[in-house]
Image (spheres, rainbow, N blue to C red):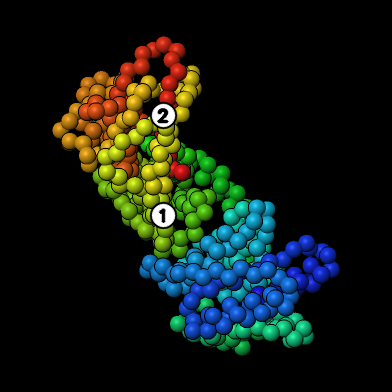
Amino acid sequence: MDSTVLLHLLICLRDKGDISDVSAVHVHHGLSCYADQWAEHCQSICDRWKVSLTITRVSLENQGYGLEQAARDARYQVFVNAVKEGGCLLQGHHRDDQAETVLLRLFRGTGVDGIQGIPGKRPLGNGLLLRPLLNVPRSAIEDYARSNSLQFIEDDSNTDERFSRNFLRQRLIPMVEERWPGVSERLVEFVREVGQVNQVVQQHTADQLETCIDYRPQWLLDQQPLINIAAMKLLDIGSQRRVVREWLKLQEIQPPSRETLEQIFFEVVEARVDAEPLLRISNRFTLTRYQQMLVVLDEEIRLNAFEPMLWDWRKEPVLELGDRSLICRSVQEKEGRVIQLPQKTLLLKRRCHISGDEKFAIAGRQGRKTLKKWLQDYKVPPWLREYLPFIFDGKQMVAAPGLWSCVDDGSGDVDGISLSWKSA
């Protein structure tokens, strides 16, 4: 009903000339035996109103976080792909949805930013996500649908109280409204006030986060923002929690529940000094600590566990190795570290292909050490060590891209090659 009313409103604006174009997207989750009928209904409505419709089928990957979350993740990926550069995707969420969301987050243990509920607008892919009906009660939407004789289909799962949101909608909120009429409206007003206060808190938190953010491109982490734990611990306990939540939001990661946030501090931040803690905080992201830095690991980044391979860097200056690429480019000496690569095809190996007893000399460093010792000296994170490509000329190591060269290029003004191993 909500989406149908929203689309009808947009059609009216289009026909009046207030907006130039409207298209629709329908996500086919495949969870209901009626899913095909729903898609056909949507196509019928859009054909009648002369709206282009994209129907996208998704397959759900439930990785232990519930069917609702899996469906939401799949749905929003479709939405991101649907938004054109500078375009808007509109959703039909209304005031009653807002009340449900706030209660759901409270019961699950949200922080202050979570209690703000559903945002009226936010970035989405290359455009914006807008919810123009967010302050409109469901009753008004029902009246509009009735007065305009709109046809719509209610999802049969909306009455299934196994889903938390349906339990709130079908049972809890009606009981509360019966005892305290208008409580949903007052809850939304309260959330709006909290949001205004939280804007001030968020700005203060953003300023605090700036003092804790650090970068370690020399660890092959490119420009990924890390949290310097020593700097964070200069803040009070409450500020530390808010800083971590803001840091995760900065990386477009869903803010954790209060329980998960406490796990982050207990299991990661405060872990033993010699520990290598790992905490899964969502389907996609894992949190770890390395060299007293908090680091987010993206499980969707594929690192290529390749076998020894030949590489003609002159013909293929960019070599894709999963979601990271080995890149060489011509640079001038004054631009930074350069290397003189042999003018021939070279050999790429991983750590597992190199003897643990073999020792190497690195240009500009004293002594010969095993690869394990050099990786520790250069503080290469453990999760990257097994995938890092090492460049060989026969049995002689030439370089570790982004880290070191084994070739002494002299101290003159020499142009050469810059080597890096970066996320695509």
Q: Nearer the viewer, mark 2 or mark 1?
A: 2
Report the front residue among 143 and 289. Answer: 143
Q: Quadrant of residue 130?
A: bottom right
What's the mark number on residue 300? 1
- Residue 281 visible, this orientation: yes
* Element class at badge 1: loop
Q: Residue at x 74, y 63 (%)?
A: 21
Please say if 91 is above or below 346: below
Q: Identify the mark nearer the N-term, 2 or 1.
A: 1
Query: Amino acid type of disc 1?
Result: Glu
**Is residue 48 shown above or below 18?**
below
Which residue is at the front of the view, 63 or 265? 63
Q: Look at 40% across and 69% down and name the residue there.
A: 62
111 or 294, which lies in front? 294
The tag on residue 369 is none
Given the current orientation, which residue lies at the most extreme right position? Answer: 16
Mark 1 closeness class: few <14, some 14–19, many ≥20 residues within 10 Å: few
Give how far across and how far down residue 238 sits, in percent. 47, 54
Report whether 185 appears left or right of 307. Answer: right
State the mark number for residue 314: 2
Q: Residue placed at 37% from the left, 21% from the top?
A: 340
Alpha carbons under labels 2 and 1: distance apart: 30 Å
Left or right: where 199 falls relative to 168: right
Residue 147 location (% of width, % of height): 77, 85
The amino acid type found where label 2 is placed reads Arg
- Would residue 189 be seen by someone viewing this image from the given angle? no
> Which residue, as the protein is rendered here, is positioned at the far left?
357
Instruction: Give residue 194's position: percent from left, percent from top.
Output: 62, 63
Q: Residue at x 68, y 68 (%)?
A: 52
Q: Secondary structure at mark 2?
A: loop
- Residue 19 lies, in percent from the top left, at 78, 63
